[in-house]
Image (tube, helix red, strand yellow):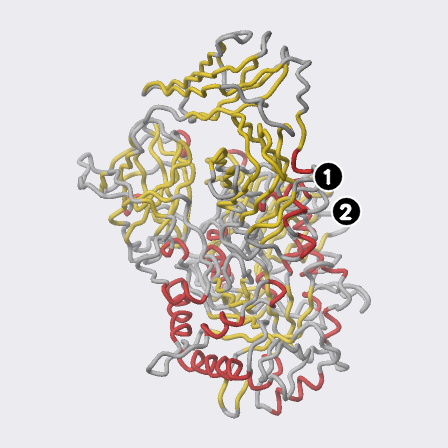
């Protein structure tokens, strides 16, 4: 793997016998159940990586060479959460079908490549929670520049499986206009000497190792008939060898001739990719958006002896969302039931195009798309000309089929992380791996007269995780509101209990719907005060003993008439009992990424059998107290941005049982050694290196985080010395000046001297500093390539931010500007994707600039690393050159597509300025 840099550091690992954890993490003193701590000291090699673990994106040849044992990111991309069993709830309205299904093809991650494997510090992610309405999730991804074979990231699989939803990866052969290559398809379906399909075997291996549920094959590259036939044979091979719980899904695109010809139906042209005689080829078929009527597709499925609900009629909501022309009702036949199942393409519109990554808009859009404008699945007011919401025609499903059941209403992101009602970690985050099962019904609320309670996801407060459910609105004293939360299928024993944790003025009763009973069973509870205003109400389930509970809800009362806010923090059901939990063993550190010289991201792993364990919490010992750092359902985890507070840090991994309790005595700890502190690094830049007398120059230093002081010396300047990371100087006389900068930290000093760096000229010298790129003599005809004529090299040199140079077909894009003659150059200014109105995630990250007098011998003058800005500026020592080469070493933050809206080459249209 390219990311790996071999470097040796050492850590010592410690296995604990009994390590106690208190309840308040911010003020918990380390306690030992046994005063004798057993330490196993060993030297372990910790590899250094350029990046934290990222989700996988491959091409056919890299898929063939992929090996989970040699891929250091593979353990972090695996899901350990088994697929939950789920059942249907009762119909919320008369239009809901109990047979038709929903397939969601969602872009679950912002980028194909570069997605952190286990979440991060960004809150605005697609943390989908309306799992009750979908039957399979396609984690859609793929691009010709980043990778076309893309498994789901492990955190998405974790959240899907916890909700009982299978999730599949994507194989995407793009159209030629988007970089598709027929040779990729040919490589993919190639057999070996024994008649096997090696790529199919690799797909099966990856889904098994990563723990997801199959593949969606999206073949939109034109190929020949032989390759199309091989693809069909490939799919049969995959079908015959895959586990029963896995799926192969085909997109209605290629026909047997090899041409891409979307049918918009199941017909004679594409039926062979679903069923070949008695042989099943694919498990589902996604009908392209071009469909007009669906009755013939239904009939064709029946003719093939296949369930019509194996067909999914596509509705594209990527651009217009709920305003798209097609509606859920478009799939419904004359008898009021869907003719085939529903396939939604890019319902992540709720966050992307529809929400513009505004989290509040995202939740509102989720309500509109999946439920309806009323936010109540019982509502049927929307007409056929409106988006009715998925809930109108598709019944809810639930994974709540056994006890214990615990939910903290944690949606997997937030503004801070809470434990037992206390804030234990500041800062925004996303961690879909630990998303809870959210309410089945959003929302089924019955207010008595005088009450106006409404429900919403809230990040204002939480009990465990980053969110809660907020009930807000006017309440009248003594009047009650019933909230139906979960469809269930559980059988309670007389010894079972339940509890709800809330904050706010309220009396909470438990409401249970029982099989065969028309009226819900209302159970009163006893209250227990917790910390920070939270209250736990406890209930006995004895009145429901030996009965099947089909729904769980709450009855809420307020003793006063007032506008009320009530937060639901936790619901727990099941008998409180001790369950055996597997111990955590052999906690080790497997890698590190240096963020800066005071910050490192640390990879860790541990061993356990995982019995009765739902997740693991990771703590760091700081000044004798335990500080929460993260939580995962995996047995590998990356601790992000760990700050150095000494040469070492001690970490603890605690298993969480199926009741949500920490099992302190089954934990394991290890001591991590940070990278040895070195003298600071420093690079110097200037606002300009060519100025007139009395003009001010700003010098800036990019230094290591550990730097305590920066000293400057410019002999002949005013002033001649200064301190700070950014300082200003002026000059009373023309001439050439040398800059000396010194960075200082606890390990020593680093000095940088830039000889003859600044050139100061008299105001009457006739020097005109300008953008040489826009002069008529400047041309650009050489480079790595461009997507089309309207995005060629010259559009990077036209001085306009409405045009750009774009190259999506090269690993390291480059272009050369010919100034027409040798000229004096003093610096450069680059305008990246964000400057042109595109995503700043597409800004160039790393680039080099080189100059040449003859176009053969090149001298590097800029090496810019780690750029995130929309606009970057680099001043250089004066140089005379005719040719200038821009080499994008990392064309995006995560991808490799060049997007340069403008490249200014700053200098003077003459030579002879540089003095010896």
- Is 152 left, or right, of 291 in this rendering? left
Q: Which residue is mark 2?
A: 450
Q: Which residue is mark 1?
A: 561
Residue 652, above or below 204: above
Q: Nearer the viewer, residue 762 or 447?
A: 762
Residue at the spot x=53%, y=89% of the render? 276
Residue 35 at x, y = what percent?
19, 34
The residues tagged by marks 2 and 1 sit, at their Cα atoms, a distance apart of 9 Å
Q: Is residue 525 visible?
A: no
Q: Residues within 10 Å of mark 1 (few under 14, many from 20)?
A: some
**Residues at discs 2 and 1 in contact (Cβ within 8 Å):** yes
Residue 40 at x, y = what percent?
17, 41
Label number found at residue 692? none
Q: Secondary structure at mark 2?
A: loop
Residue 347 at x, y = what percent?
64, 60
Q: Residues within 10 Å of mark 2 (few under 14, many from 20)?
A: some
Residue 446 at x, y = what percent?
71, 55
Residue at the spot x=56%, y=77% of the render? 223
Q: Earlier in the sequence, mark 2 or mark 1?
A: 2
């Amino acid at each position: 793997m390219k990311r790996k840099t071999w470097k040796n550091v050492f850590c010592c690992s410690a296995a604990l016998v009994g390590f106690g954890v208190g309840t308040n993490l911010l003020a918990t003193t380390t306690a030992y159940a046994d005063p004798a701590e057993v330490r196993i000291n060993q030297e372990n090699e910790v590899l250094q990586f350029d990046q934290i673990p990222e989700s996988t994106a491959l091409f056919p040849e890299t898929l063939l060479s992929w090996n989970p044992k040699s891929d250091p990111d593979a353990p972090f991309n695996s899901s350990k959460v088994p697929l939950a069993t789920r059942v249907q709830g009762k119909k919320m309205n008369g239009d809901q079908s109990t047979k038709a299904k929903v397939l969601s093809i969602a872009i679950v991650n912002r980028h194909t490549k570069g997605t952190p494997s286990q979440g991060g510090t960004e809150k605005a992610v697609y943390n989908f929670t309306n799992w009750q309405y979908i039957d399979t999730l396609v984690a859609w991804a793929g691009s010709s520049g980043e990778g076309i074979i893309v498994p789901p990231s492990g955190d998405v699989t974790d959240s899907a499986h916890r909700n009982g939803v299978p999730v599949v990866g994507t194989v995407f052969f793009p159209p030629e206009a988007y970089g598709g290559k027929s040779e990729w398809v040919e490589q993919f379906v190639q057999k070996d000497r024994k008649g096997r399909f090696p790529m199919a075997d690799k797909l099966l291996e990856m889904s098994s190792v990563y723990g997801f549920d199959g593949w969606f094959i999206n073949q939109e590259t034109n190929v020949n008939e032989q390759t199309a036939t091989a693809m069909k044979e490939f799919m049969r091979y995959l079908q015959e060898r895959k586990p029963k719980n896995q799926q192969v899904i085909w997109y209605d695109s290629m026909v047997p001739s090899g041409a891409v010809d979307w049918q918009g139906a199941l017909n004679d042209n594409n039926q062979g990719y679903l069923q070949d005689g008695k042989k099943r080829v694919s498990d589902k078929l996604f009908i392209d958006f071009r469909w007009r009527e669906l009755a013939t597709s239904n009939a064709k499925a029946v003719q093939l002896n296949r369930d019509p609900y194996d067909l999914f009629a596509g509705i594209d909501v990527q651009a217009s969302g709920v305003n798209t022309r097609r509606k859920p009702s478009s799939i419904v036949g004359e008898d009021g039931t869907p003719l085939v199942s529903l396939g939604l393409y890019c319902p992540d519109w709720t966050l992307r195009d529809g929400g513009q990554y505004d989290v509040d808009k995202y939740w509102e859009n989720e309500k509109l798309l999946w439920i309806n404008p009323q936010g109540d699945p019982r509502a049927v007011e929307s007409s056929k000309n409106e988006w009715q919401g998925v809930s109108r025609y598709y019944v809810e499903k639930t994974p709540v089929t056994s006890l214990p059941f615990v939910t903290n209403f944690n949606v997997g992101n937030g503004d801070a992380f809470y434990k037992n009602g206390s804030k234990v970690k500041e800062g925004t985050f996303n961690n879909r791996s630990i998303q809870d099962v959210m309410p089945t019904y959003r929302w089924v609320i019955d207010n008595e007269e005088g009450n106006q309670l409404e429900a919403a996801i809230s990040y204002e407060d939480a009990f465990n995780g980053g969110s809660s459910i907020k009930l807000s609105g006017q309440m009248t004293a003594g009047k009650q509101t019933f909230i139906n939360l979960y469809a269930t299928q559980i059988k309670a024993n007389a010894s079972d209990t339940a509890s709800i944790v809330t904050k706010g003025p309220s009396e909470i009763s438990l409401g249970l719907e029982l099989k065969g009973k028309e009226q819900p069973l209302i159970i009163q509870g006893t209250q227990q005060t917790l910390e920070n205003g939270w209250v736990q109400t406890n209930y006995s389930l004895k009145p429901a003993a030996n009965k099947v509970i089909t729904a769980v809800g709450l009855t809420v009362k307020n003793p006063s008439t007032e506008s009320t806010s009530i937060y639901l923090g936790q619901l727990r059901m099941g008998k409180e009992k001790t369950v055996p939990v597997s111990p955590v063993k052999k906690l080790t550190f497997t890698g590190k990424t240096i963020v800066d010289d005071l910050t490192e991201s640390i990879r860790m792993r541990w061993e356990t059998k995982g019995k009765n364990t739902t997740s693991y919490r990771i703590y760091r010992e700081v000044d004798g107290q335990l500080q929460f750092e993260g939580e995962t359902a995996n047995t590998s985890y990356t601790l992000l941005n760990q700050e150095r507070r000494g040469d070492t840090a001690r970490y603890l991994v605690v298993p969480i049982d199926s009741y949500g309790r920490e099992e302190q005595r089954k934990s394991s700890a290890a001591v991590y050694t940070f990278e040895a502190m070195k003298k600071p690094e420093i690079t110097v830049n200037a606002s300009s290196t060519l100025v007139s007398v009395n003009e001010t120059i700003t010098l800036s230093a990019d230094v290591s985080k550990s730097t305590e002081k920066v000293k400057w010396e410019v002999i002949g300047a005013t002033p001649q010395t200064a301190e700070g990371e950014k300082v200003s100087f002026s000059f009373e006389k023309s001439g050439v000046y040398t800059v000396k900068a010194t960075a200082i930290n606890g390990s020593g000093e680093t000095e940088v001297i830039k000889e003859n760096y600044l050139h100061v000229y008299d105001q009457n010298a006739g020097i005109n500093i300008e953008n040489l790129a826009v002069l008529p003599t400047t041309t650009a005809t050489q480079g790595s390539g461009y997507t089309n004529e309207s995005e060629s090299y010259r559009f990077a040199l036209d001085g306009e931010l409405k045009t750009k140079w774009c190259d999506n077909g090269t690993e390291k894009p480059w272009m050369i500007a010919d100034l027409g003659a040798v000229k004096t150059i003093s610096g450069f200014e680059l305008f990246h994707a964000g400057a042109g109105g595109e995503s700043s995630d597409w800004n160039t990250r790393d680039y080099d600039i080189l100059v040449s007098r003859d176009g053969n011998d090149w001298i590097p003058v800029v090496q810019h690393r780690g750029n995130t800005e929309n606009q970057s500026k680099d001043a250089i020592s004066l140089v005379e050159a005719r040719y200038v080469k821009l080499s994008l070493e990392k064309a995006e933050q995560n991808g490799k597509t060049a997007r340069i809206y403008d490249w200014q080459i700053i200098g003077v249209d003459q030579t002879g300025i540089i003095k010896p």
